[in-house]
Image: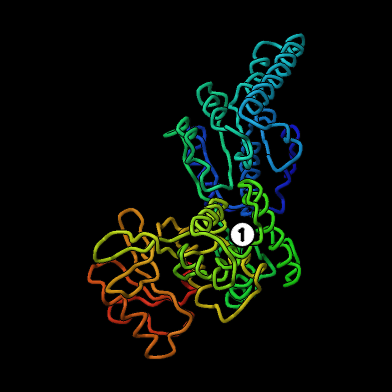
Amino acid sequence: MIETVKNLRIDTANFVVRERYLNAIGAFSDQPVVKVLKGMRRVGKSVIMRLLIEQLLNSGVPGANIMYINKESLEFDALKDYRDLYRYTVDYFKADATASQSTMVRQAHHDNEAHQDSVAAPHSSKRYIFIDEIQEIEGWERAVSSFLADGLGDVIISGSNANLLSSELATLISGRYVEIPVYPLTFREFLTFRKDKAGSPEEEFKNYLKYGGLPGIHQLPSNDEVIFSYLNSILNTVLYKDVITRHKIRDASIFDKLVRYLFDNIGNITTAKKISDYFKSQRVKTSVDTVLNYINYVEQSLLIDKAPRYDIKGRKLLEFFDKVFLNDIGLRHGLIGYREKDINGLLENIVFKELQARGYRMSIGVIDQMEIDFVAEKHGGRKYIQVCYSLGSEAAIEREFGNLEKIKDNYEKMVISMDKFFPAERNGIIHRYLIDFLLE
C-alpha cells in the first residue's frame, strides 16, 4: 500500500510485519497513555511506526489526522526543544482543522445537511502523534505531557536511549506511559525475513550466528564483506552520535579500546577494576571512574545489556560483578570479525536475547560458588538455564547438569546445547536442542 500522511510517503509493501509489537501497541490504542518504543538504532522502530500508520489509514483515519516526525530526518532539524515540538504539533493539526472547515463550507452550498455530517465525521476522528527518536528533542517530556493534558491526540514515541524515561522531567508523564522494548530479530523472525531465500533451520542459524538480527541486513546480498561493512557503519553511527558526541568524550582512542574489550568479552564477568587493570597492562592510563562512565554511556546507547549476578541460596543480587551481553551479535563481528572459537559466548548471548524478547528478567545465578548461566524470571515464575555448545564429554555433562542439580527448589531447570540427539531429560532436568528452543 502507498499512502501519504502529509509529507510522509507510506510504502509498506516490502515490510515484514512484526505482529507482537503491533499487538502490544494495539492493546493500548486510543488509551490516555504514551506508547514508548525503546530499542537501539536500526532495530526497526521506524518500520513498526509506519506499519501502525498503515493500519490507521486502512481503518479509515484520514492521513491529515496523523502526524509523523522523524528526528533522524533533516526535515525536522528545526525542532530543537519542547517549545518547537509543541508549536509544530498544534500548528500541524490547526492547519488541518482550518482546511476541513473550508471544505465543509464549500460542501454546504451543494449538499444537504446529512451529507455535511458524513463529510465532517472523518475530520472529527481521533488524532495520532508519532515521534521517532524523540530523545533528540530537548525537554520533550514537557510537550508530551501537554499533549496528554490537552487531549491533542494518541501519542506514540520511540527512542534509542536506555535513560529515555529516567530524567527528572519524565515525572511529568509518570504513570501515563507504557514502555514496549523493541529487540533485534529473534531467530523465528529472522527466518520470516529470509522469506523464499531461507535454507534449512541449521543453515539459517549459521547466518543468524554470523550476521545477527538487525532487519536491514535482509536488504543486502548475503556477503560477509557487504554485511559486515553495513553493521560496522551502524556501530560507528551509534558510538559517535549517541555516545562520543552526546557525552563529549575527549579521548576517543581509549573509548574505542573499551568498546572492543566489551565486545570481545561477551558472557564474561566484567568489572571496571578488571578493565582498568587490563588497560594498565597495555600501558594505557585511565581511571576506574572513567571506565565506569564509559560503560554506562555504552549501556545507555542500548548496544549492551548487563546481567547482574544472583545468589540463589541467599536470594539477593551480588553487586559489581555483572556479565555483559550485546543487543546484536552481528555488530561484534562487524567490529572484530567472526571467530568460531567464541561459540559458547555467542550462544549464551543468543539465548539471553531470546529470553529477554519473551519477557523474562535476566540474571546470572550463583550457588556454592558454581555459576548458573541464567536465572530467568517472569510473572512470579522462574527458570534456571545452562547454555553450552556441546555435551560431547562426561565432564561437560556433569558440569552443565550437575550445577543445576544443586538447586533444590521446584522451578524448571534446563540445559540448552547444539546436541540434536541428546536425551530429552536427565535426572529431572530438561535438555533442549538450541534451534528447537529458538523456534518454540
Residue 65 position, x and y percent, is: 65, 28
Q: Quadrant of residue 68?
A: top right
Q: Residue at x 70, y 14 (%)?
A: 101
- Please give the residue where the numbered disc 1 appears in the rendered image: 255
Q: Is 224 on the left-hand or right-hand side of 38?
A: right
Q: Residue at x 49, y 32 (%)?
A: 169
Colour theme: rainbow
Q: Vertically, is 162 above or below 395?
A: above
Mark 1 is on which residue type?
Phe
Q: Vertically, is 147 above or below 162?
A: above
Q: Can residue 218 be seen in this snapshot?
A: no
Q: Residue at x 66, y 73 (%)?
A: 337
Numbered disc 1: secondary structure:
helix
Asked whether 2 or 227 is in front, the reply is 227
Q: Is 234 on the left-hand or right-hand side of 151?
A: right
Residue 192 position, x and y percent, is: 61, 62
Asked whether 241 or 119 is in front, the reply is 241
**What residue occupies the far top of the structure in this picture?**
109
Q: Is 343 on the left-hand or right-hand side of 87?
A: left
Q: Residue at x 46, y 84 (%)?
A: 390
Query: How many numbered marks, from 0 up?
Result: 1
Task: State which quarter of the image contains the N terminus.
Answer: top right
Residue 339 position, x and y percent, is: 61, 78
Q: Vertically, is 51 above or below 393?
A: above
Residue 244 position, x and y percent, is: 64, 51
